[in-house]
Image (tube, rainbow, N blue to C red):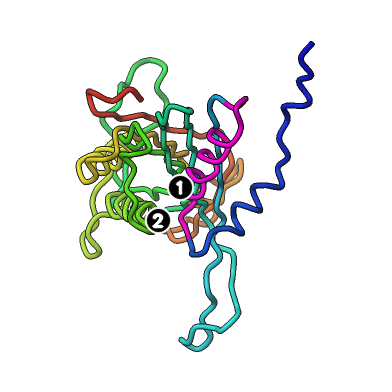
Amino acid sequence: MLDLFSLLLATDQVYVKAKECSEQVSVEEFAILLAKHFTSFYHQVTHAIINIVEKPWERVYIDGQPHEHGFKLGSEKHTTEVILKKSGVIQLTSGVEGLALLKTTKSGFEGYIRDQYTALPETRERMLATEVTASWRYAYESLSSVPQKPQFFTDRYLDVKKDLVDTFYGPPKEGVYSPSVQNTLYLMAKSVLNRFPDISSIKLKMPNIHFLPVNLKNKDNQTIVKFADDVYLPTDEPHGSIQASLSRFWSKM
């Protein structure tokens, strides 16, 4: 009778493989390294699934000067998933979580279906705030096709994140109008696929985080204090969580 417990692997070797890295590597490179180790070194492992979340520490600046040993924890996280088979077939996904974005104007919600169940009025002027979760699948299908350039995936992660942010905001002076979160999400995903040919698909999740203009009132007076859209109330009332996936026609998603 096969003793399944005799086939279990200890997790300590993750630290050993990290120690063996003689230079800094991206989370994608480290995930591939771990997957190669488990699938090649152990006969009982037919494929490996490696998930890594990188929390970014950013160097602190004091009076404009970089601090020698001071760091603060950044906001968004860099994620990756590698699925590797013994044959060398690979699926590689990268992503970002917790990317908080807000613009104070150039946003509305209009052009949607209106019927007897619609109570929300259309508007061409509102705040747009969200927290982006994105993941993108690379088109590489084998280990031999994965780029070997050092820090390739770190640079690509930063470039994709910048492209998402730039599309959300538009040019620095005039910005870009957003008729809906759905429209903006689609344009962000489309821009990534247009710019990076080695990305085959992308998934985006963008909750519509509300900041509502304040207007104080009571049952006797509908306008005690009328604010001129200069004081806003963040609210956790029910809100839409907009999600979509966009892929090239040949992608297997």
Disc 1 versus disc 2: distance between alpha carbons?
8 Å
**Disc 1 crowd, CA 10 A, few/some/many (<14, 14-19, 20+):** many
Which residue is painted at 70% across and 42% down in the image? 11
Observer-nearest residue: 157 or 36? 36
Q: Position of residue 84 (x, y in %)?
A: 47, 32
Question: Is 76 rendered above or below residue 142?
Answer: below
Q: Which quadrant does the N terminus fall into?
A: top right
Label 1 sits on residue? 28
Residue 144, given in percent of the width and then of the height, sits at 33, 39
Residue 172 vs residue 38, the one in the foreground: 38
- Sequence order check, earlier mark of 1 and 2: 1
The residue lying furthest to the top in this view is: 1
Q: What residue type is labelled 1?
A: Glu
Horizontal relation, residue 172 to residue 207: left or right: left
Q: Mark 2 points at which residue?
A: 154
Q: Do the residues labelled 1 and 2 touch (CB within 8 Å)?
A: yes
Q: Which amino acid does label 2 sit on?
A: Thr
| Magenta-highlighted residues | 25-45
